Amino acid sequence: MAIEINDEYFEKLAQAVIDGEEEECVELVNAGLEAGVDPLEAVEKGLGRGIGKVGEDFGAGIIFLPELAMAADVMKQGTAILDERIKASGADRLSHGKVVIGTIKGDIHDIGKSVVAAVLQANGYDVIDIGIDIDVDTFLDAVKEHDADALGMSTLLTLPLMEMEKVIQRMQETGMRDNVKVIVGGCPVTQEFADEIGADAVGFDAQDAVLKLDGLLGINRPCGDA
Amino acid sequence: MKGFDGKLVGSVYPITTEECESVHAAAIRVLEQGGLRCDDERAAKMFEDAGCTLENNRELVKFPENVVMDALGQCPGSFTLHGRNDPDLDCSIGTGEVHFCTVTGRYIDDIHSGERRKATRQDAIDGTLMADALENVHGLYKPVMWLYDEEMICNSQILTTEWMKHTNKPGTWVYNTGAEHEVSDLIKMWQMAAGGEEEMRRKPHMLGHVVVNPPRVIDVHYTDWLIGFCDSGTPLSIESALMGGATGPATRAGMLVQCMAEMYALVVQSQSYKPGHPLAFCSFSPAMDMRTGLWATGTPEYGINGGGIAAMAKYHDVPIVGFGMSDSCEFDQQTAHEKALKNYNYALAGVNWIIDIGGTAGFNLVSWPEMVLENEMAAYIGEYLKGIQIDEDRLSVDTILKVGPLPGSYMKEKHTRKWFREEFFMPTLNNKEFFESWQRGHVELQEKAKQEAIGILENHQSPVAPELQQELDSYLDFCLKRDLG
């Protein structure tokens, strides 16, 4: 794919994210890199604008979760390629923060956590979704590996709830807790429970998780942006 | 208790018999070509014994059609959920009767303060007594989901103790906390309530819920329950629990195909473990709400899909039960119309045991006045199901010829006196007043329901024998000492 780096290129990149077209996005990114696109510019003017529009449209009720989730996946694929080049150049791209997210050990419910991951991503966060039935060590390893700003833990069940406390306790023991915000969520999670186990916030739904994380990480958005 | 058995029960289905054949064939293709993942050796052995093939280090089960058909052929077409020590409370499942059962919730709208708060042990007692008192509530699901004023480790045991101590009506059980002794303790308590192990096997009073993890995974915890239920003689309610667009396809037909494939797998598993064990298909296959990711249980597609599962149940001569529910976060007009439409749709499709009375918001909220109101809704549905009875006396030709033309009136006719109570519905709560009288002063429907609920809570006594109550308390003490020290 021979292309020129211009506004039309960035527009196509954004549209590939909006349309959830993974193959097209990857092709455009690779072709852009061959044509000498600045990877930071490709994220900000292309992929970032696309996911921003998706986030806005989701908030406005124009598009729905499958479209949001697919766009978030495409964004992730594209940024993964561009990130390598950005890192190699020693630069850093703009992100509201890195969030590791997963469902706690003893629970295999995936959807609520995945919805939160997609909505966070659509709102400018880098999300590392490490899956379901995640034990304490895996959470901590992921936070460390990705140098995360925040950790999100989810469950739909009651009995495994105390796994959340175990993760937070281990973070305290290992000195990780001071630098990483912890947000929890899911059906049985209440504010009292979150306070009791020492979490920083509860996300009662996906949009609430964005607002709470924004608050914890000091992200200021224009009114109505999240 | 005798359910509603009008002529319209099982008269309306969203798919034809020919379409049932297509759904069945598609579900079999899924089972033959894709199968289900199974991470539990006990379950793998059950599938192997039934004639399934195990692949990928025994973690993938594939189902030949003849295995599925053999298993379906072993399922009884009906069974009874017995009243505990009271045959008048027996509910016949699979014989053309529609029964209503309560649903559960984590929160409760407090009947006195109106405050929305977390459920407690006292609420479990109150909810059980409410259900026990109401005439169109034939059975109970957990009166509340969890007792937030008690330790979670023994929550199900405390809940079950209070439940069994305050009603003899049959019930439904679904996996609750997953605590270590949950399965064995609860079965022990149900056996006590039935009058012993053999008595419960002879007269089961609980419907035990077993679920596949969609898409297409046999769950270890539910295998624990399946074994416990089968060993104790507890009939099964088997369910896919998929969520269209998330853990199932985004078409109604596709949801139905996956539901059937997953339920067939449970039929094979249970019949392999205990041939001839009674079971019912269960409808709980909502679509995902495409904005929030929550299950959407109040929507038309949920009710229609339940009708589809009911059609498949009829096609295979297997009983059918189903969860109702509304998506509304309060008891309002939305709750009323979502429940009434869905439950009537369920009843028309012959769903034998509808689990829906008294709750809303996806197992989040219960209310006792709402239970009273929905007791009335159940009566309305039961009346609709009667349809029109045609016989010589009801055709009324002699009376029509006698009375008319004007000035004649049917009001003083013996024929009228004979039939009006049976043919015309008399609501107990709903408003039938003159408009002007109502305007001069009235009690709102919600207030009437609240007063009735308060009356029940103040006056209704548990029908359970004190000796049994003591026995249950003693066993609970044992559980608490064991788990909490």
Image (cartoon, helix red, strand yellow):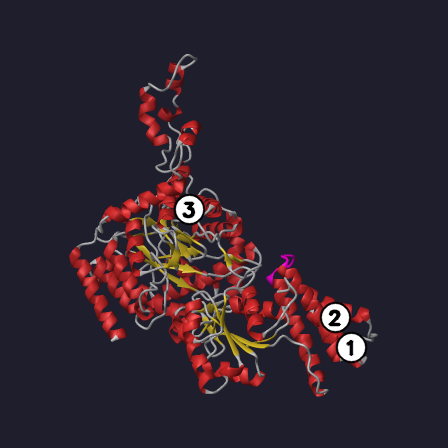
Residue B74 position by quadrant: bottom left
- Give neighbour class at mark 1: few <14, some 14-19, many 20+ (Cα, 10 Å): many
Q: Residue at x 68, y 71 (%)?
A: A22
Q: Which residue is mark 2?
A: A13
Q: Are marks 1 and 2 on the same chain?
A: yes
Q: Which residue is mark 3?
A: B350
Q: Residue at x 58, y 71 (%)?
A: A214
Q: What whole-number distance in Å separates the C-alpha atoms at marks 1 and 3?
A: 61 Å
- Give neighbour class at mark 2: few <14, some 14-19, many 20+ (Cα, 10 Å): many
Let me know if residue B281 is in the magenta part.
Answer: no
Residue A189 visible (yes or no): no
Question: Of the residues shown, which amino acid type is indicated by label 3?
Answer: Gly
Question: Of the residues shown, which amino acid type is indicated by label 2?
Answer: Leu
Magenta region, residue range: A60-65
- N-terminal-most mark, 1 or 2: 2
Secondary structure, magenta segment, majority class: loop
Q: Where residue A7 sits in the image (x, y, percent)?
A: 81, 70
Q: Nearest the camera: A197 or B239?
A: A197
Mark 3: secondary structure = loop
Q: Where residue A84 sits in the image (x, y, percent)?
A: 69, 84
Q: Where residue B401 sits in the image (x, y, percent)?
A: 40, 15
